[in-house]
Amino acid sequence: MFSTPEVTRTAFWFVLFGLPLVLAGHVAVRAAEIGDLVLLRIIGGYVFLASLLGVAAFPASPFWASLVVSALLVAAGLGVKRARDA
C-alpha cells in the first residue's frame, strides 16, 4: 500500500476517517441541541483519538484541525462557557 501514489493514500485516509468524523459531527450537533453534555464529551474523545491516528499516519493531512474541534467538543461537554456567556 505504501508504494502506491500519494493521491491514492490521501484518498484512503479521507475515506477511512472522513465519513466517521462527519457522522460524529452530526451526532454532536444533535447532542448540543438536546443538552447532552456527556455525549458531547464522548464524541470529543472519539474525535480526538481518530484525529491522533490520522495525524500519526498522515502528518500532512488536515486532521490537525480536528484536534482543535475535539478540544472544543470536550470543553462544551464539560460545560465550559465563553466569558461573554457567563
Image (cartoon, rainbow, N blue to C red):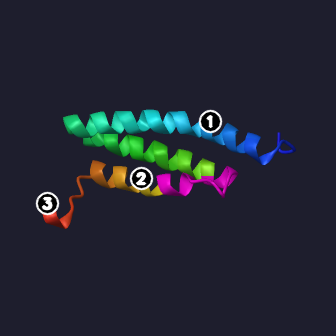
Residue in view at x 51 percent, y 34 percent: 20
Cβ–Cβ below 8 Å for labels 2 and 3? no
**Mark 2 burial class by Cα count in 10 Å: few <14, some 14-19, many 20+:** some
- Helix, strand or loop at disc 2? helix
Classify residue 18 as left or right of residue 12: left
Residue 61 in magenta stretch:
yes
Residue of label 2: 69
> Nearer the N terminus, badge 1 or badge 3?
1
Taking the view exactly as shown, the residue that stands out farthest to the right is: 3
Residue type for callout 2: Val
Foreground pick, 28 / 14: 14
> Nearer the N terminus, badge 1 or badge 2?
1
> Nearer the N terminus, badge 2 or badge 3?
2
* Distance (Cα) linking label 1 and label 3: 37 Å
Residue range corresponding to the magenta coloring = 55-66
| Quadrant assignment for the C terminus | bottom left
